[in-house]
Amino acid sequence: MPKLKTHKAASKRLKVTSTGKILRMHGLRGHLRRKKAHRATEQYDKMLHVSPADTKRLRLTMPYGTP
């Protein structure tokens, strides 16, 4: 059986924790951020858990976790 390839875009955008959960970044981070409230823009810097409905699909893109 050959090795499975990691989807490189997924490995750059997602992070797998030591317990196996997948983390993602917020949207709305880079463009037109000046006009948003400071409290809102600080929230964009934190990682979020991926919803359980999407984890099965995303695990197929990263068979070995992120490098």
Image: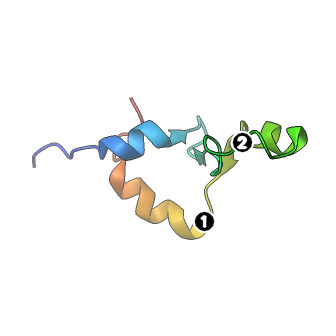
Number of residue marks: 2
Q: What residue lies at 40% left-to-right and 40% top-to-bottom?
A: 11
Using the rendered image of the protein, determine whether residue 22 is visible from the camera's viewpoint.
Answer: yes
Quadrant of res 51: bottom right
Relative height, residue 50 to residue 36 (above, below): below
Task: Give the residue type that dot 1 points to.
Answer: Pro
Mark in the foreground, 1 or 2: 2
Q: Give the residue displayed 65% in from the left and 50% down from the top.
A: 28
6 left or right of 62? left
Q: Mark 1: which secondary structure?
A: helix
- On the rendered structure, is 62 left or right of 55? left
Q: Residue furthest left?
A: 1
* Earlier sequence position, callout 1 versus callout 2: 2
- In percent of width and height, residue 42 lies at 81, 36
- Mark 2, other Cα within 10 Å: few <14 / some 14–19 / many ≥20: few
The residue that disc 1 covers is: 52
Q: Quadrant of residue 66?
A: top left
Q: Quadrant of the C terminus?
A: top left
Q: Nearer the viewer, residue 45 or 56?
A: 45
- Rounded to the nearest angstrom, the CA distance separating label 1 from label 2 is 29 Å
The residue depicted at 50 percent of the width and 43 percent of the height is 14
Q: Are marks 1 and 2 in contact (CB under 8 Å)?
A: no
Residue wearing tag 2: 33
Expressed as whole percent of the image width and height from the top left, the position of residue 44 reads 73, 42
At label 2, which amino acid type do we have?
A: Arg
Residue at horizontal 42%, vertical 54%?
59
Residue 15 in the image: above or below residue 24: above
Q: Secondary structure at mark 2?
A: loop
Q: Is residue 65 visible?
A: no
- Dot 1: few (<14), some (14–19), or many (≥20) neighbours within 10 Å? few
Residue toward you, 4 or 25: 25
